[in-house]
Image: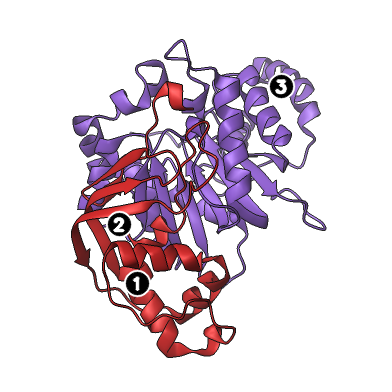
Amino acid sequence: MSRPELIAPPEVFYNRDEARKYTVNSRIQEIQAQMTERALELLNLPPDEPAFLLDVGCGSGLSGQVITEAGHSFVGVDISGDMLEVAVENETEGDVYQRDIGHGLGLREAVFDGAVSISAIQWLCNADKKSNVPHKRLMRFFNSLYKCLVRGARAIFQFYPQDDQQLALITNCAMKCGFSGGLVVDYPNSTKAKKYFLCLFAGAPTSYELPKALGEDEGEPSEGSSKKKFHHRERKSMKSKSKDWVLNKKERQRRQGKDVRPDSKYTGRKRGPKF
Amino acid sequence: MHLLTHNLLQCIVQGCRTNSFPLRIIPEDVQEDERDFNQEFMVRMLPRIHWAALLSALENLSIQHELPAELPADASSNEELLQKLHRYLLEIRVQQGALICNGCGRKYDVRQSIPNMMLNEDEV
């Protein structure tokens, strides 16, 4: 996977060219739209009520489009001025402003019904400059976010954590700032479709339960390692292209959330002799 | 930047404690969009609007308004008032200009309707 955050700071990386490329690329558009839809689903807003949302790292307004289509209003914040200019040119419905979220959002208290963020907070963990301390930046961001949300609101962050350490750093900072909640991993068995959503609750709602991830097995995650070993042994003994092998592969792809044809009596059958 | 967004933005430069809200608007180019009126949304936003900040923003833009000095108690059922608020908050847009903090004097530019709220490292 390419990691733009390892190449340059966001305000430098998302320059004029990159901003245009990003917005016209139909694959990126589709993925962003899908992830935003999922994030809105996880936000669990009351149905048929227009909500006021904050889009953190709104960029060129791809996620904003989805929010508007869902009938909500939003305010977007991003560090890249070029990305925001594209957003304004595309006439996004919501307002945008330019700011480094690691410096705090600079918004008044208790105004937003929720916050969504698509592929943005991993940028906060960058230490591009000597003055950039990831921990401090995350704390400032989560503190200001907590303040500007109404009590009981949710904030959903889709992001690509680099490693477990980074994941722990982000969640710890959020918890320290008063958020509760946790991580939802969609399609945990797939490398490609796997998506991390950090679901945070501002203020303690009377009862909450983490939303269920998509494409997840019934098994406990702790069983994962033993299962893997079992698979490994099984695959070794299984003859390649045999019926069991095919069924096993289809099952695996189903777990990864891929589009797989249903099993039938023809599955894995040998084709007849040709003349 | 519409006035609804102006109603949220606050100066958080280090050491700026008093008068950091609302920011004073120095308008250069003000335009008006036309947008659909959504009554449900306006009613929902009513308690979250900082009334004094809205009035001062309208004053900065030298817009004649007939809004009362305080948010009336029956505002949510007063459609005429909601229509007016819709126009002031969501249709009037500052295209070019600047925002100035009344507390510390920090100036934020507004270019192409985007307020630039970026801070220098020493201001955080």
Q: Is residue B121 left or right of residue A136?
A: left
Q: Nearer the viewer, mark 2 or mark 3?
A: 2
The residue that mark 3 highlights is: A228
The spot of residue B112 in percent (x, y) is 21, 49
Quarter assignment of residue B56: bottom left
Q: Amino acid at mark 3?
A: Lys
Which color has been applied to chain B in this rendered view? red
Mark 3: few, some, or many residues within 10 Å (few <14, many ≥20)? Answer: few
Q: Residues within 10 Å of mark 2 (few under 14, many from 20)?
A: some
User: In the picture provided, is A15 more to the left or to the right than A97?
Assistant: left
Residue at 37 percent of width and 38 percent of height: B106
Q: Nearer the viewer, mark 1 or mark 2?
A: 1
Of residues B4 and A19, the one nearer the viewer is B4
- In the rendered image, the quadrant that contains the N terminus of chain B is bottom left
Q: Residue at x 50, y 26 (%)?
A: A124
Q: Amino acid at mark 2?
A: Thr
Q: Quadrant of residue A234?
A: top right
Q: Would you place residue A119 above or below residue B31 in this image?
A: above
Q: Chain ID for label 2?
A: A
User: Could you tell me how far apart the alpha carbons at marks 1 and 3 are, in whole angstroms?
Assistant: 60 Å
Q: Label 1, on which residue?
A: B88
- Asked if one can make out residue A242 in the rendered structure from this viewpoint, the answer is no
Give x and y (percent) for residue A122: 50, 28
- The tint of chain A in the picture is purple
Secondary element at image label 1: helix
SS state under label 3: helix
| In the rendered image, the vertical position of residue A182 relative to residue A208, given as above or below | above
Q: Tell me the residue that label 2 is attached to.
A: A92
